[in-house]
Image (cartoon, grey):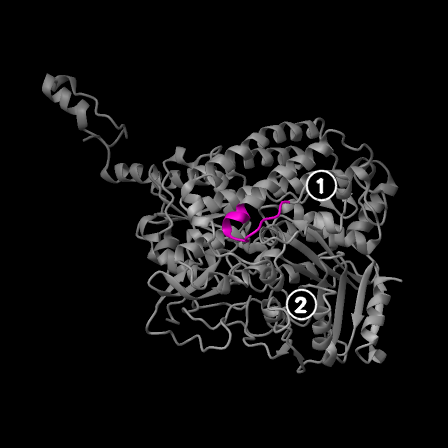
Amino acid sequence: MSKLDNIKTDLASKFNTANYKFVHAFGDDVLEIPKEDILPVLRHFKASQRFDFLMDICGVDYPTRQKRFDVVYHLFSSKDGSRLRIKCQLAENDWIDSAINTWVGADWFEREAYDMFGIKFNGHPNLRKILTHHQFVGHPLRKDYEADAQQHCTEPLPIHFNNEPGVDGSILNDRYVPLNIGPSHPAMHGTLRVMVELDGETIVRANPEIGYLHRCFEKMAETHPYNQVIPYTDRLNYCSAPMNNVGYCKAVERLLGVEIPPKAQAMRVVLAELSRIIDHIIAVGTGGVDLGALSAFFHLFTYREKVYTLFEKLCGSRLTVAMTRVGGMAQDTPEGWFDDVLAFCKDMRGQVDEISRLMLDNKIFIKRTQGVCPVTATEAVQWGYTGPLLRASGVNLDLRKATPYYGYDALNFDVPVGTSGDIYDRYLVRIEEMKQSIRIIEQICKNPPSGDYTIRDKGIVLPEKKDVYGNIEGLMNHFMLIIKGLRPPAGEVYDATEAANGELGFYLISDGSANPYRLKVRPPCFAIYQSFPSVVKGAMIADAIATVASMNLIAGELDR
Amino acid sequence: MNSADGSVLAKPDQSLATQSLDDMSRAYAFTTRLDDLVAWGRKNSLWPMPYGTACCGIELMSVMGPRYDLARFGAEVVRFSPRQADLLLVAGTITEKMAPVLVRIYEQMLDPKYVISMGACASSGGFYRAYHVLQGCDKVIPVDVYVPGCPPTPEAVLDGVMALQRMIAKHTPRPWKDQWKSPYEQTR
């Protein structure tokens, strides 16, 4: 009995499932239900503990349909790693019940769906714009909004607390001191903005404002062929760009139904784990800078440069590599590359120990981070935390173990789990993960698989240059693929990988044309950052800075 | 004072040479125009304010970091306050939401001030021809040097800094600076 059948019988005992639709396509379980039943069904799934995570809520626009929008809920179970997608159709001026009382983490996802599509959620305490600026008119991800129709913003938004639900945030409290931090502030990583009300140095309420780096990734993806989206994915989490390439290509490949050769899988795993190391270097290094420790930053960045050198050797590019292609990799590894990686690992192993001595054994660092702004496991699951932050809170969930891909199940590595979910634990988990990544890389590089680095399907992968310039078939193949583009069958998948700071999901809808019909990214730090006001409430202002640093917020994927 | 040949240290005039005059000129006489001297000082002590918003900001960290080391160019002290900086390094995409903030930062900087636009996004919007991306930060503030690349290599950024140093040393006229008005003046 399949999982979907299980769900079917389970729901049939509680609900009138006559007009429900159960679909199993491209390996995903999908449930289509009318909008009145959304909230009861979600409640039921949560109460029966069948699904404990609400990973994402997003909209899809079908302008020719009578009920124009699809509202899509992505559920995930940490017990068996199963997923379920719930969809319901909604007309233009219709309402749907908000899931915020079931999962608090629905807050920002629903606001985003409202901002991008104009989908209205009944009972959401604070349904306001989130990514576009306050003078923006319209809903940009609707199909009838032109991708390049810019609307200028002429004045910065004054300090306000309107993002906090249930209060009139334009009125500031006389008893407290309002303070604006960012978006251009060294501790706010360039694009984050936090407005706080202070009682002395204690935070009474905090209000994050995002969208300062909303670069319209999803709209750009809709207007570009599949392979040309890869450079855009690089710029989502630019601290660990190759991981985003891998995640996106994996989703497209699943839609196409192809499996990449072992060599390509090994290259992707090595690239992803190297990226995890440099991402954690940024998190630990700049986290130290935010607490006033500059030496760790200089120390660690030496090693970041060494990884960049490896990337440069592989493909000529440093930060944004765009190294994967749908169907494999762009090119083969140069001679001796795996040995270079091994040499780096040996170097890095000692370095990680030194950094943990330099930072984690530092008395000031311990005092600033231990017991500061802890997040319990229940809260973390409620908010939709994933990755190192979830594990620091004590939940043992790693997609590399829960739903293994690219041969992770054959590799030996441990998943570090924290206990208290405070800032100190988050750094501990990251440092330990760097060691585990080194272990993974060493296992692969000691015995790299041979064979081709890409599949050779003429409808998906460009021919090699010697064929393009050497024979007519290669030339025609190249032209056809460039002009027509690769065309996956119509359908949709949700595919997730374990990125450096959590679950990076790509929800991809294809209508059979050369461009994705819709590409929704589920960025890990979007769900994490929405918990910020409640996490720092009652803490000191300096603790808020430490919290922002430990969350490893990457604006590129936060705002997309 | 001899400014024609542009030499920095004075050559002692042999016909009038006395020991004391010679000593004095060797000690502290500079034969150059005052503004040349000032420009020389300015170009060698840039205080950058990194306005890193995105990927370029990460690459800018590499420029500041141990291997590429921007400090070698006298641009050592990274200031996060516009009042203490004379070089605005716009590194990363400027969105419509961010543009008014950028203008305010630029206005708060004291003269003389210079702007380097680092990377494709800051210079032209890059490959984001999109509804929420400003198509180049020169739409709102005047830019002295554009560094191409997405993101530029650290070498390219250092080259951009050196290009700016040459411009400062040569007093290259930048008329767009004098004509600059805040694009939001009408609305304020």
Q: Total marks drawn?
A: 2
Q: Is residue A348 visible?
A: yes
Q: Amino acid at mark 2?
A: Ile
Q: Is residue A329 left or right of residue B186?
A: right
Q: Nearer the viewer, residue B15 or A78?
A: A78
Q: Is residue A292 magenta?
A: no
Residue B80 lies left or right of residue B36; in this view the side is right
Identify the residue shown where x is 76% and y is 79%.
Answer: A34
Query: Which of the labelled discs sits on residue A57, or is there none?
Result: 2
- What chain does badge 2 belong to? A
Q: Is residue A257 above or below residue B70?
A: below
Q: Magenta stretch?
A: A416-427
Return the residue nearer the eye: A224 or A353.
Answer: A353
Say if B12 sits above or below A538 in the image: above
**A494 or A118, which lies in front?**
A494
Residue B103 at what x, y percent from top left? Answer: 40, 60
Q: Secondary structure at mark 1?
A: helix
Write down the quadrant of residue A510 in the picture: bottom right
Q: Which residue is mark 1?
A: A269
Looking at the figure, which quarter contains the N terminus of chain A?
bottom right
A107, A515: nearer the viewer: A107
Q: Residue at x 82, y 49 (%)?
A: A460
Quadrant where the C terminus of chain A lies? bottom right
Q: Say if the magenta span includes residue A425.
A: yes
Say what secondary structure mark 2 lies in: strand
How far across and down, in percent of the image, does residue A198 sit? 37, 65
- Residue at position x 67%, y 64% from top? A56
Do marks 2 and 1 both belong to one polypeptide chain?
Answer: yes
Circle 1: residue type? Val
Residue furthest to the front in view is A419
Left or right: B102 with respect to A281? Answer: left
